[in-house]
Image (spheres, helix red, strand yellow):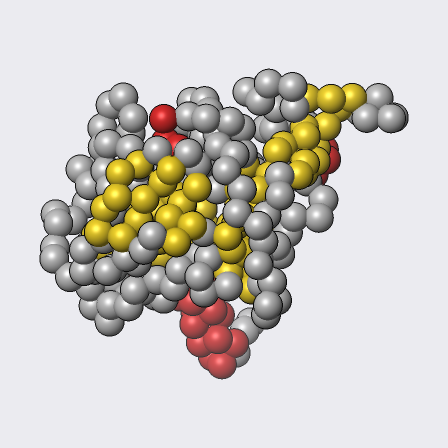
Amino acid sequence: MMSGEELTMNGAGGDTADQVKPGTDWLGELRGIFWLILAVLGFHSFVAKPFYIPSESMLPGLLIGDRLVVTKYPYGFSFVSPTFHLLPFIKGRVFGRLPVRGDVVIATPPGTTEDYIKRVIGLPGDTLEVKRGVVLLNGVPVKRGPIHDKLIAVDANATCTDYSGALRAGRDGVFECHLPIVTETLPNGRTYDTVELGYSPGDDYPAVKIPANHVFLMGDNRDRSADSRFALGEPDKGLGGPVSWEYLGGRAEFITFSVDGSSTWNPISWFTAFRSGRAGTSLQAAQAPVGTAPAVAGQSGSGARAR
């Protein structure tokens, strides 16, 4: 026979075993996911956002397949700052600052939700003109160095088929893209490479005085870039002249990684598709050494344009 104490303990143990365990707090889980998504969207909208290069408009510095970081705060915030372009036009910027000449920026053409990546060439108050491919700022030609080749490795994302005569086999039989390059130096000393292909419609642009709080943007691949030189909408899909600062979404900082377009469903190819040597590349224009003055060249470009 069991003692009274044993009976009491057994009864208590049975009650504990019969207790129902609490279920999953689905509302709490959804609340946590909501705040996580909100935090990510907030970071992308106001701090930094990853960006993918889908075109060759910024060759030779940016290749199709490059992934880069764009910071949102350098110029303050506007209605295009949020990750999704859902807001109507709102005039002005919060903590607004103008870009520095030579910055690579993200811009959203008026009336669209697309993001373009271009370089700041003209600032408010400048008179900008393009004559046979040479940019004139306030009547003074932008300094240009001699034309020279730059070799770009050929892969699925950089086929070089759009550039007549540029695709050549190297000594080892591997094909390379020999792009004709002209180095430009802006009045503030910032320098960068541009692709020079011969004459194209964008190589002549009438003089325009850039209004207050506007910038003039151009792609480095001058003859494959839909930028401020071209009209909005079809067929040019340009930026329609100087761009109001409300349409600037941020500043491109550096490349995080780059892929050559060879990846398949095979997970191993996800790693072999990485291009070497591009991660960490800064997108800030270099500063030319003091006293350098490249000769002014008159070559210009031709061909279709890409964003």
Which quadrant of the figure has residue 237? Answer: top left
Does residue 206 lie above or below 41 as drawn? above
Residue 120, above or below 15: above
Residue 7 percent across, percent down from the top left:
47, 73
Q: Nearer the viewer, residue 64 or 51?
A: 64
The answer to which of 267 and 256 lies nearer the viewer is: 256
* Farthest-out residue, bottom: 5
Spot occupied by residue 132 in the image (x, y as percentages of width and height): 42, 34
User: As displayed, is residue 255 above or below residue 130?
Assistant: below
Quarter containing the N terminus: bottom right
Residue at the (42%, 25%) spot, across then down: 200
Q: Quadrant of the C terminus?
A: top left
Residue 78 seen by the camera: no
Q: Quadrant of residue 288?
A: bottom right
The x and y percentages for residue 150 are 67, 38
Residue at 68% of width from left, 21% of height from top?
167
- Depth check: give the residue in front, 218 or 294: 294
User: Who is closer to the viewer here, 20 or 283?
Assistant: 283
The answer to whether residue 12 of the structure is visible from this angle is: yes
Picture coordinates of residue 173 (x, y %)?
84, 21
Image-based side of 270 in relation to 10, left or right: right
Residue beneath the point at 22% across and 28% down:
233
Left or right of 292: which side holds 96? left
Residue pictured at 35% horizontal, 62% vertical: 99
Q: Total marks drawn?
A: 0
Q: Quadrant of residue 96?
A: bottom left
Task: Name the side, left or right, on which 35 lies relative to 145.
Answer: left
